[in-house]
Amino acid sequence: MSGKTPIPVARAMREVACNLDLARRQQRITVDLLSERANLSVPTVRSLLNEGKGSLENFLRVARILGMLDHVVAATDPLNTPEGRLRADEDTPRRVRIR
């Protein structure tokens, strides 16, 4: 299932990469030190910071080092969305099956 990355996703990848790189620079952390602390290779960290490309685990490792991990987790909490709050009282199924 590989294909061209949708434009909104590519834009978000670039924005997240810029945000991570800005946080790194604000904290005066070199790419070498960040990669060492995250236990990742320098090229992997550079790819994440420059293009937003990498695995979810690597993104979360870098976010943790930069003190952003709790914010990332909170940002993905469905209860922080209007839809999630509306549906919070409903019985949420463990699985969604297509009939």
Image (cartoon, helix red, strand yellow):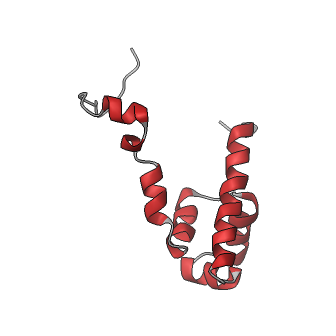
Most foreground residue, 1 or 63: 63
* The N terminus: image quadrant: top right
**Residue 75: horizontal and vertical position, in percent?**
47, 51
Q: Say above or below: 30 vs 18.
A: below
Which residue appears at 56% of the width and 78% of the height?
39
Q: Say above or below: 13 vs 40.
A: above
Which residue appears at 54% of the width and 67% of the height?
63
**Residue 37: horizontal and vertical position, in percent?**
55, 82
> Image quadrant of residue 66?
bottom right
Which residue appears at 67% of the width and 48% of the height?
12
Which residue appears at 65% of the width and 75% of the height?
24
Q: Say above or below: 56 vs 32.
A: above
Q: Say above or below: 54 vs 42.
A: above
> Image quadrant of residue 82?
top left
**Residue 27: horizontal and vertical position, in percent?**
62, 80
Q: How many marks?
A: 0
Most foreground residue, 26 or 4: 26
**Residue 47: horizontal and vertical position, in percent?**
73, 65
* The C terminus: image quadrant: top left
* Left or right, residue 39 beside residue 29: left
Q: Residue furthest top?
A: 99
Residue 41 in sight: no
Residue 18 in sight: yes
